[in-house]
């Protein structure tokens, strides 16, 4: 089976990422030769599909991780709507929709040019050419026979590109001939009004634009079968679910995942009306995603899981009569695993730690000073604590603590993401103290040790980026795809703990697991108790 790439890719010779996705097999023929208009940030990018297209590829025009993720999701959702439009065939526009779409051209055109519109004479000439087109006397129109054919061709030559652009903005790949003629007529009228408005601007008249009132919004112009945003829209249900979920402590990563799932469903269905979604729709959506090459695990654990959560909230809060995703699932075949060791082996662990010891900020390093320091210390911290890489990556100077003779690290949601949302203090191994980690921390300025000087609300993007850089760092010496670069330390710490006899409750506490039994939840785990058990772990001595 062929699998599409679902993560943003890095462009050669540039730090910017790009979007690349396989075109679904069922619409390949209809997609051939199309020119797509894809919104990327504030731009509209044209992408021409070849005579034998297999993928859509477009630059996301940014390297910022949080912006890359947002743009990647927006492009994916936009393409889903285009693919569904191709499956549905050419669309028929109402007169109101045509006027609304023409109005969007009017608004964008006048807003873009009103500050510096040029000379009044320019816009008089533009209006003259517009009127020539409406009379059938523009472009190749006069060469045709018959007034109707002449007028249609003139309008197409003059305004066809505007029509294609506004349809592309709204992910409408095709409309029927009657609708295209209707839209050309309305765009011609709108561009006449735009020329007059810009002529007035050029003459110094910036009074309120009376033309705006004549154009309905594209949402208001949608047919009755496509409701305006309200309590039963998919978008509104997602927003309502997130308000409660966020208050309950769910992570932003969960919100982002569910938002993507809803966007995929909305693009597949071609509407935003939650009340119209049936169990059969969810099954068709599941089959569609699998046919696109999405893995069964992703469909089950991301797509369906997100939809079930949002629809369950809607049903429980009487926004919908029932949960249309309930009971819909996909069988995930067990993945063959040839490796018997879940965590790093002795050789792998020593290779990573030796690599880390040589990571220092200097002018010859391709890494920034903060990232170089993270590569130096985070692998060692994970090796001796079993903590999550993200928990170590977000450490701050104030998170280094001391109780008597024992040093520890405070892992807290105040710093960023902690899976359990519960703070804990874990002991530092004597080897980390001997290597000078406490001294290193005390020399640093206040704030994050390995992240830029930012607040907690802005930390997610740089934090995710740092975790990715740490993956790349480990992969320079450990290439086995069956060991997880950031999770391998947690498995190894548990393995070592069993070998040397660290009690399970101490291990559970240090790695941040919810311990078993009521006893785990009584009392505390002081550093002296942790340090006593942690001393059983022999120090690493990488070559």
Image (cartoon, grey):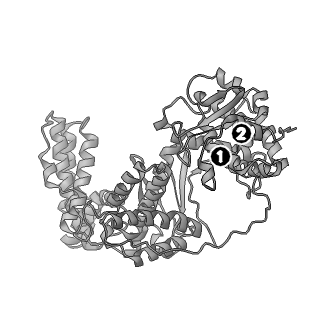
> Dot 2: few (<14), some (14–19), or many (≥20) neighbours within 10 Å?
many
Q: Residue 509 carries which label?
A: 1
Residue 164: horizontal and vertical position, in percent?
34, 60
Q: Which residue is drawn at 58% across and 64% down?
A: 4
- The image quadrant where one finds the C terminus is top right
Residue 483: horizontal and vertical position, in percent?
74, 55
Total number of numbered discs in the rendering: 2
Alpha-carbon distance for marks 2 and 1?
9 Å
Q: Dot 2 corresponds to which residue?
A: 530
Res 344 visible: yes
Residue lying farthest right? Answer: 543
Residue 44: horizontal and vertical position, in percent?
39, 51
Residue 327 against residue 239 in the figure, above or below:
below
Residue 535 against residue 484 in the figure, above or below:
above
- Quarter holding residue 93: bottom left
Q: Earlier in the sequence, mark 2 or mark 1?
A: 1
Q: Residue at x 85, y 39 (%)?
A: 542
Residue 275 against residue 7 in the figure, above or below:
below
Secondary structure under tag 2 reads: helix
User: Observer-nearest residue: 159 or 78?
Assistant: 78
- Quarter holding residue 183: bottom left
Q: Which residue is drawn at 50% across and 51% down?
A: 253
The answer to whether marks 2 and 1 mark residues whose Cβ atoms lie closer than 8 Å is yes
Res 367 visible: no
Residue 332: horizontal and vertical position, in percent?
61, 72
Secondary structure under tag 1 reads: helix
């Amino acid at each position: 089976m062929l699998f599409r790439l679902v993560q943003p890719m890095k462009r050669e010779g540039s730090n910017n990422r790009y979007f690349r996705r396989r075109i679904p097999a069922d619409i390949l023929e209809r997609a051939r030769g199309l020119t797509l208009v894809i919104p990327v940030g504030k731009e509209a990018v044209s992408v021409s599909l070849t005579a034998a297209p297999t993928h859509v590829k477009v630059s996301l025009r940014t390297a910022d991780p949080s912006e890359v993720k947002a743009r990647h999701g927006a492009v994916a959702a936009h393409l889903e709507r285009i693919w569904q439009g191709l499956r549905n065939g050419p669309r028929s526009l109402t007169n109101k929709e045509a006027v609304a779409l023409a109005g969007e051209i009017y608004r964008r055109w006048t807003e873009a040019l009103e500050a510096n519109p040029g000379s009044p004479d320019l816009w008089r000439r533009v209006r003259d050419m517009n009127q020539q087109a409406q009379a059938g006397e523009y472009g190749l129109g006069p060469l045709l026979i018959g007034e109707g054919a002449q007028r249609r061709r003139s309008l197409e030559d003059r305004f066809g590109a505007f029509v294609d652009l506004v349809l592309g903005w709204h992910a409408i790949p095709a409309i029927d001939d009657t609708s295209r003629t209707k839209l050309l007529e309305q765009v011609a009228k709108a561009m006449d009004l735009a020329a007059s408005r810009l002529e007035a601007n050029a003459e110094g008249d910036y009074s309120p634009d009376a033309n705006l009132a004549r154009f309905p919004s594209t949402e208001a112009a949608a047919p009755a079968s496509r409701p305006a945003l309200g309590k039963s829209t998919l978008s509104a249900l997602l927003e309502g679910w997130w308000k409660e979920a966020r208050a309950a402590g769910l992570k932003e990563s969960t919100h982002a995942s569910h938002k993507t799932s809803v966007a995929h469903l909305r693009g597949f269905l071609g509407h935003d009306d939650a009340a119209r979604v049936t169990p059969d729709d969810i099954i068709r959506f599941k089959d569609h995603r699998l046919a696109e090459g999405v893995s069964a695990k992703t469909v089950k654990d991301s797509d369906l899981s997100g939809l079930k959560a949002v629809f369950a909230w809607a049903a429980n809060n009487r926004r919908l009569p029932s949960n249309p995703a309930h009971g819909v699932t996909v069988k995930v075949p067990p993945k063959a695993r040839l490796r018997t060791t879940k965590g790093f082996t002795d050789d792998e662990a020593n290779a990573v730690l030796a690599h880390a010891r040589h990571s220092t900020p200097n002018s010859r390093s391709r890494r920034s000073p903060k990232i170089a320091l993270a590569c130096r210390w985070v692998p060692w911290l994970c090796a001796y604590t079993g903590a999550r890489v993200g928990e170590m990556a977000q450490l701050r100077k104030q998170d280094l603590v001391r109780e008597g003779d024992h040093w520890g690290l405070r892992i807290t949601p105040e710093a960023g993401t902690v899976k359990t949302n519960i703070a804990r203090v874990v002991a530092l191994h004597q080897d980390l103290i001997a290597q000078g980690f406490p001294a290193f921390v005390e020399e640093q300025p206040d704030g994050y040790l390995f992240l830029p000087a930012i607040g907690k609300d802005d930390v997610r993007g740089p934090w995710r980026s740092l975790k990715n850089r740490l993956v790349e760092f480990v992969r320079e010496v450990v290439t086995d795809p069956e060991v997880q670069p950031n999770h391998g330390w947690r498995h190894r710490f548990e393995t070592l703990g069993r070998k040397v006899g660290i009690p399970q409750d101490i291990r559970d506490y240090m790695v941040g697991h919810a311990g078993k039994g009521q006893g785990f939840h009584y009392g505390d785990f002081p550093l002296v108790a942790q340090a006593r058990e942690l001393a059983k772990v022999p120090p690493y001595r990488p070559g």
